[in-house]
Amino acid sequence: MAGFLTTHVLDTARGCPAQGLRIDLYRIDGETRTHLKTLVTNDDGRTDEQILPENAFATGVYELVFHAGAYLDAAGTPPEEPRFLDVVPLRFGMSDAAHYHVPLLLSPFGYSTYRGS
């Protein structure tokens, strides 16, 4: 089985997929953080392509950066200055060639994640 990475972002406060949320992918190698890709979620809160497809997959440490504040602003969530959640970084390891699914459940005042399937 070849490895790849996907996500799904759900707005738990509004009860819908988080459409239009920008996500940056970084590879972490010691103290070096390398930007690999920027994607935006579609109508279903997913990206139109795999975040890290099979042909680019490598084990190691990665970081997904979810731009929650900009999404919440665009979604019409009442603003606050500063926002409680603005940028949500999730750092995780991928140790074998498998499907890694890293969802984000988001609200203006909290989030959770897990390794999905």
Image: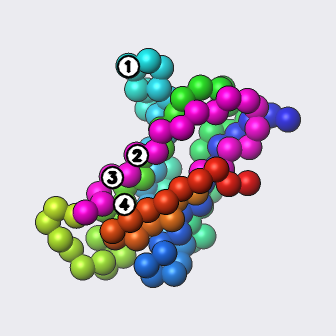
Q: Earlier in the sequence, mark 2 or mark 4?
A: 4
Asked whether residue 106 appears in the rendered view, the answer is: yes
Q: Are marks 1 and 2 in contact (CB under 8 Å)?
A: no
Which stretch is magenta?
Answer: 84-102
Which amino acid lies under the numbered mark 4 shown in the image of this protein? Ala
Q: Are marks 4 and 3 in contact (CB under 8 Å)?
A: yes
Do the residues under discs 2 and 4 have CB atoms within 8 angstroms? no
Q: Which mark is residue 31?
A: 1
Say which residue label 2 marks.
89
| Furthest-right residue in this view | 1
Instruction: Please name the amino acid that badge 3 sits on.
Output: Val
- Residue 48: x %, y % from top left: 62, 56
Label 4, secondary structure: give it. helix
In the rendering, which numbered label is found on residue 4? none
Foreground disc of the pair 4, 1: 1
Magenta segment: does it hold 100?
A: yes
Give residue 47's quadrant in the image: bottom right
For the point 38% across and 19% down, the residue is 31
Q: CA distance from mark 4 to mark 3?
A: 6 Å
Locate the C terminus and report the quarter of the image it occupies.
Answer: bottom right
Mark closest to the chain's N terminus, 4 or 1 = 1
Residue occupying image coordinates x 48% and y 72%: 11
Near mark 1 (Cα within 10 A), the count class, few <14, some 14-19 or many ≥20, is few
Question: CB of mark 4 within 8 Å of CB of mark 1?
Answer: no
Q: Is residue 15 above or below residue 24?
A: below
Which one is in front in this view, the residue at disc 2 or the one at disc 4? 2
> Gap in Å between the C-alphas at discs 4 and 1?
25 Å
Residue 74 position, x and y percent, is 33, 72
Question: What residue lies at 59% left-to-right and 26% top-to-bottom?
Answer: 60
State left or right for residue 68 relative to residue 103.
Answer: left
**Location of residue 97 in the rendering, given as x and y in whole percent from the top left corner:** 76, 32
Quarter of the image where the N terminus is located: top right
